[in-house]
Amino acid sequence: MPGRSFSSRCRQIVSIMAASLLLPSAVQAESPWRDPHPQRLDGFVEGREFLYNSSSFINRFSYRQLSDSPPPGEDGLSGTGGSVTGDELYLETNLQKTLYFDGDRYGIIARMQRREDFDGRFDRQLIGIVRRLGDDWRAALVADVAGDKGEVDFQYEATWQPDESQKLRLALIQVDRLYNNKSNSNNRYERTPVTLFAHYHRQLGSQLSADLAVNYSPHAQYEDRNHGLYIRGDQLRIAGSVTFPLTRQWRSELSFKYEDTDREYRGLGTEISVGQDGFSRRMRSATWQMTSESDARYQGGLHYFTLDEEGWFGQNLASSGFHRRDEILLFAGMTLGRRASSWWQPTLSIGSIDVDRVMLQRPQDNRQDDEWQARLTLPWRYVVHQQSGAVLTLNPTLNLDSLKFGGGNIQLHWPF
């Protein structure tokens, strides 16, 4: 299944950016969508190692990060972790620290990221050099260094921030740049993965702002000689959000996420391989929310999520098939018991979930669900460091549809 042409991808990116920037928006605390996100070798060769059940994404929505600070690319510690099944956790953690030398021009930057996407779980440990270029610009060269030199990723960044009201962040990632010359593997890249990233945020007022992030990985070409496969893959991820006032007491927020992934598989030489139909993924997500500015701080909204995957799922699941799901969630919450350093933020989510999955080589994992689910989250939020505004969140969850405990979630947001 060949991917789309480079020119069509460019037209698609430009049209989405133009449409999105007509609206003002707020930066959301979804770091995997607003940080550079490389197309990983294990992602497009091996695929994810776990299956989603009917409650996978309503659980992840219940565990979404509740603070926007520290934002992606800034020093601080942020993370959310919670139980999604009896033996699986959903984790998203980010740690960044920058230390400047005497003179305040050069410095060392270090990042730790533990995340998951639709291709599985992954870690990135980045360390490198940062340099200030005048008052508005900053450049950085970082690398995800591994013991196997062929697995080292290089990341080049530039950040423009003329004032507190706007920020532009650009990045170029060379994944496995030295793989063919330095790796211990017999496999080879015909074209090593490259990822282009841009994120722009503009604050237009106390309740009026806009942001858009684009992450594009054009065709990577890989020869998996151990399995007799030629693999070609590309990926486009876009995220944006909007916030604007409705009345003096209410503001509205709209955010969206968008992913297109295409992969082509074919055999090397005369060897026979599975999965030669290729693979495609189409994900669309949109969330609309209204929030009051009163002391009680009411909020409510609508979340829509659709995922359509078809083809060869990779070596981990070792099956062809399709996976389609559509979810619509209604949610409402409020702030209770507000004190100087703590408050409760209960939220009720009710949604319709429709799942259809067929795994041709794993028929025991086929499933078809059409059901309603409800979650009550009871996050208690406590300011653990007044000076920085660090907040610890303890978030127990109740499954109202089955009347049982739904797992616990812990979050920490600590700007440095």
Image: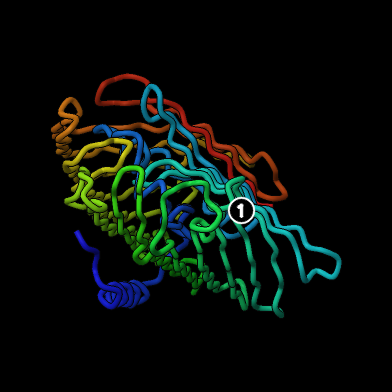
Question: Who is closer to the viewer here, 322 or 307?
Answer: 322
Q: Which residue is mark 1?
A: 126
Question: Who is closer to the viewer here, 336 or 219?
Answer: 219
What residue is shown at x 17% (from left), y 43% (from top)? 322
- Which amino acid does the dot numbered 1 rest on? Leu
27 relative to 110 in the view: left or right = left
Task: Judge whether 232 appears above or below 159 on screen.
Answer: above
Horizontal and vertical percent position of residue 193: 43, 61
What residue is shown at x 47% (from left), y 68% (from top)? 199
Q: Is residue 376 visible?
A: yes
Q: Is residue 243 visible?
A: no
Horizontal and vertical percent position of residue 364: 18, 25
Horizontal and vertical percent position of residue 369: 15, 32
75 relative to 289 in the view: left or right = right
Question: Who is closer to the viewer here, 212 or 282?
Answer: 282
What residue is shown at x 47% (from left), y 32% (from top)? 409
Q: Looking at this rendering, what residue extends furthest in the right direction?
A: 102
Task: Judge whether 248 appears above or below 162 on screen.
Answer: above
Task: Judge whether 399 appears above or below 153 on screen.
Answer: above
Q: Check the picture and name the quadrant holding the N terminus.
A: bottom left
